Image: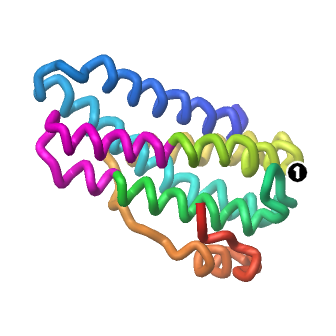
Amino acid sequence: MDITELILTDHHEQRRMFALLDDLRDAPTEQVKPVWERLKVLLEVHAEAEEKLFYPKLLEVGQGAGSKDSPEGETGDALHDHNEIRDAVAEVGKHRVGSGPWWDAVAEAREANSDHMGEEEREALADFRRHASLQARQDLALQFAVFEAEHFRGVEAEDHDPKQYVAEHGGDPAKASDEG
């Protein structure tokens, strides 16, 4: 198992869950709510696993890919995106499930997440595939899978300052993008 493939699999599951919500648009709240609650947990646990495991390793071995010329840029952008996704998910929680404002907030969360996944797939994952050994990718995948299994009920959502995160993990904060 390769960490980049595992992250792509998670991304597919997130897209599938948002599509399932599309199919439940006119369904009773008792059907919509558990799907959203599961997706909310998936989003946060995935982000936390990336922040604890994937991005520190990217800062060690990455060289930049796509529109980012450094792993600090990729990492800072990802942290910024994760914060936007967390904020959008929090906004969903302010509304009654199934209401118009609730669906609008879900759409915002979906957009933030979709934008992030696309960038990450073009940049950070491509960079890691090119510069991390297969053994490192496999080892990290196992750690990532165990983390997600251990936290299947969720984790505390917590925003992180992108530049501070990069500095704390050995990168140059001046190169960290803190915008999406």
- Indicate the position of residue 105 as horizontal and vertical percent values: 29, 46
Query: As shown in the figure, which amino acid type bears the numbered disc 1?
Result: His
Badge 1 density bin: few <14, some 14–19, many ≥20, Cα 10 Å: some
Which residue is under mark 1?
Answer: 131
Question: Residue at position x 62%, y 78% from top?
Answer: 163
Estimate the x, y position of residue 66 in percent, counting from the top left.
81, 49
In this image, 30 relative to 44: left or right? left
Q: Position of residue 56 (x, y in %)?
A: 68, 64
In the displayed structure, does residue 114 sit left or right of residue 122?
left
Quadrant position of residue 104? top left
**Is residue 152 among what the camera can see?**
no
Front one among 129 and 139: 129
Q: Which residues are magenta?
A: 89-113
For the N terminus, the image quarter is top right
Image quarter hosting the C terminus: bottom right
User: Residue 23 location, x and y as percent?
Assistant: 31, 17
